[in-house]
Image: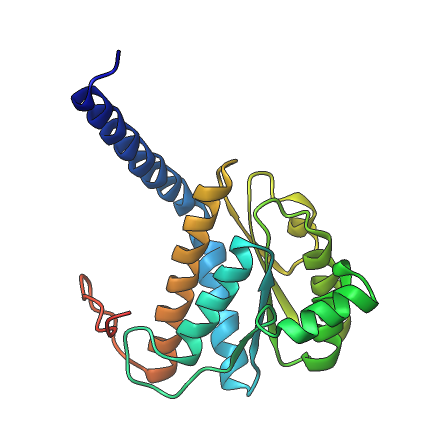
Amino acid sequence: METAGGRSASLKDHVLRSIEESIAVKELLKSQTDNIARATEIIVRCIRNGGKILLFGNGGSAADAQHIAAEFMGRYLLERPPIPAIALTVNTSSLTAIANDIGFESIFDRQINALCTSKDIVIGISTSGNSRNVLQGIEAARVKGATTIGLTGGSGGKLVHSVDIAIVVPSQLTSRIQESHILIGHIFSELAEREISRAPFEVGETSRKGSQ
């Protein structure tokens, strides 16, 4: 029979294992440094040229799209003008109308066709890289002439071959992939606002974000 102490020790072991797994995936993510830096350069160029950032995904990836858009629109570390970014997952009336009248696979490409221009950056997020509506949204963006970035994981799925820049988290676990997608989004936010603000990079600087 398992004792309370044994149960507590087991829970602590699981917590430690989860933290170690997350750290291990982020160590492997260093292989994507060049792609993350290149994506950031393109985002900065887009903003300076008067473009905007459009993001989308399903489920947890929808939440990630909204989180990253909020970092751009608000602030990350620095006081600076807002960076135009829209998560295409927040208008429930549009989402449900498109899904009901046209089909769930069209919830993103329909909005891209309405909102996207060739000056914009479109970021599609899919842990598998095979979400049909994400792929259709990316294809619509390419037709519009926008630059496309994919955040994915594992083998990268079809998304790797559909975007201009693919950032693939080297893990098969959805949870670990999503944790790394937020890290990538935070890197985009920090580097973009520093470049736009011409702020110096300070090693070890702590966040000045307000409480959330």
Tally of marks: 0
Image quadrant assignment for residue 153: top right
Quadrant of the image containing the C terminus:
bottom left
In the image as oriented, which residue stretches furthest toward the right?
A: 102
User: In this figure, which colouring scheme has been used for the structure?
Assistant: rainbow
Q: Is residue 85 left or right of residue 78?
A: right
Between 5 and 85, the one lying in front of the other is 5
Image quadrant assignment for residue 99: bottom right
Kindly tell me whether residue 117 is visible in this rendering. Answer: no
Quadrant of the image containing the N terminus:
top left
In the image, residue 36 lies at what x, y percent?
46, 58
Q: Is residue 209 left or right of residue 82?
A: left
Between 55 and 24, the one lying in front of the other is 55
Please tell me which residue is depicted at 48% across the width and 60% down the height of the picture: 64
Kindly tell me whether residue 79 is visible in this rendering. Answer: yes
Please tell me which residue is depicted at 42% across the width and 53% down the height of the picture: 33
In the image as oriented, which residue stretches furthest toward the top?
A: 1
Where 187 falls versus 83 (above or below)?
above
Q: Is residue 204 left or right of residue 43?
A: left
Please tell me which residue is depicted at 28% across the width and 74% down the height of the picture: 77
Between 45 and 113, the one lying in front of the other is 113
Where 152 falls versus 88 (above or below)?
above
Q: Is residue 58 left or right of residue 23?
A: right
In the image, residue 184 lies at what x, y percent?
42, 58
Please tell me which residue is depicted at 43% across the width and 42% down the height of the picture: 176
